[in-house]
Image (cartoon, rainbow, N blue to C red):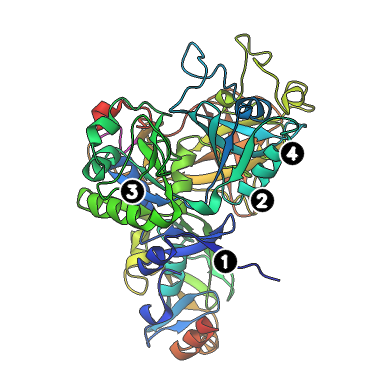
Amino acid sequence: MTIASKKTRLHHWHVSNGAKMAVFGGYSMPLWYSSAKNEHLAVLIRAGLFDTGHMAAITVEGPDAHDLLQNCFTKDLDACLGKIAAPIREGRCVYGAFLTPDGGVIDDSIVYKRSEGRYLVVVNAGMGADISAHLTAQRNSRNVTVTDMTDQLGKIDIQGPLAARILARILTDAHRVLDAMPYFSFKGSFDEKYPVSVAVRLKEGIPLLLSRTGYTGEFGFELFMAADRTSAVWNALFKAGEPLGLAACGLAARDSLRGGAVLPLSHQDIGPWPFINHPWPFALPFNAGGDGFTKSFIGDRALLNAGPPAYTLAFAGQDLRKVSIHDPAFAMDVSGTRIGDVLTCVTDMGIDRVNGQIVSVASPDKPREFKPRGLCCGFIKIDRMLPAGQKVRLKDNRRTIDVTIVDDIRPNRTARCKIEQML
Amino acid sequence: MTKEIKELNFPEDVRYTDDHEWAKKQGDVIKVGITDYAQDQLGDIVFAELPQVGDAFEKGAEFGTLESVKAVSELYLPVGGEVVTVNEEITDAPELVNNDPYGGGWMLTLKPSNAGEFDTLMDREAYIAKLKG
């Protein structure tokens, strides 16, 4: 039996604009339009528009919503904002994961606090039902309602240094909306009737939840709207952005951008193994000593008492050549002993090595006439901790490549830039 | 897929393989590349790994790889023989394979070891029929 893939509200636009389509997370999605490389570069130097309607959203509402999330979500909502670890507040969102009791990842997520007792949980494609069922199963006697909003909401991401300027062209009262919007904050609601302190609307009146987040490592926004408004929002963004070089982008560019930004792909870089010893410690509620957690949550004991150690580390290659994780590919130390597996291996098309150092098309100090050929990068999961700078060998059926363990990959990313500088 | 079969270019003067390579007779040598269908499926080609002049291969042998943004794909020889020339230009400008697969995006020429092998390859009509399944 074959199960037909789902279509997003923008399916017709993708097909009529020449997208190469593929099934991802149960949805037929664009891989690229005319060039994944140009789409990747557009996000680094101008802006890119992504249909992310395949992602799922769940509302968690009620007097005990906060308590349910504290029990199920890895981030400590009472101690998560800024250096002082302030509690989450209205208009802020945080990244974390939902774990099984043995510490494995069910899915990663961004949790939004919309108001007291009202949260929005955004998870990956096809995960709306699973995470809803998980939250409902953990509810017990708590007074909280869990609603899978997946088919009622549309989602579009606009990412890249020009994202705010493009949005400013189509938002009502744009300067008030875009004022003082730090990374991982949001304003507005997709729900016409929802009371918000700052409404976010397109000039034609469509209400939005506008979130300063994304999956590219670059400055930008994720926009949530009622599903039947998705095309109108997409068309308005595209029309406003096209003269500034905005490019519609597919999943290939999304994958290569997130790879260079050291962001994990759920069910590939994080999955049914203990969610610890990885490049995303900010997703866990470590105490000041780093030897325990500031709260208890499902999976916490398994993380602190994990069995044979496994370490997920980022790497960057010497040139653009990749290994194929489908072969599969494995990691070796320099003596040729197998030490683990390759989780992700992509080419970030916007970077290259110059005298050994990684330089991006967005680097202010890049050499004149810098034309990157791309650099292979990704994640390995190995049986030992290795410091940045350590050489590792990756091997698939075709080739062996030398890569270096790194703390970071693509330099000069814009995700955290001040919004005032981007307008 | 990106383009309909009818939007793709399949010249009359080359022969085609099941693996989406093409071969063209040029005097004593056979010129080899990948088809418009293959480049369209692969997407942006960012790197080509090609053999050395003088290397000899059997028909159907893997002679190199093409690396696109998403994947690494093997190249298979339409006919057996010895490599006479390799297109060095695509090492510096791999996008030639996307932009001009039958022209500037050619891969190599070979001296065929068995002249009869070329005649077993598909013509344009047979290849299009195969693509349409």
Residue position for label 2: A328
Which chain contains the residue that carries disc 2? A
- What's the distance in space between the residues labelled 1 and 4, CA to CA? 53 Å
Q: Are marks 1 and 4 in contact (CB under 8 Å)?
A: no
Tell me which amino acid carries mark 4.
Ala
Q: Which residue is mark 1?
A: B62
- Dot 3 falls on a residue whose secondary structure is loop
Q: Earlier in the sequence, mark 3 or mark 2?
A: 3
Is residue A359 shown above or below B62? Answer: above
User: Which residue has dot 3 on it?
Assistant: A206
Q: Residue at x 52, y 57 (%)?
A: B72
Do the dots labelled 1 and 4 sit on one chain?
no
Say the numbered circle drawn on residue A330. Answer: none
The CA distance from mark 3 to mark 1 is 55 Å
Q: Which residue is mark 4?
A: A137
- Give the residue at x 36% y 44%: A207
Which kind of residue does numbered mark 1 sit on? Answer: Glu
Residues at circles 2 and 1 in contact by the CB criterion of under 8 Å: no
* Residues in magenta, as a range: A360-367
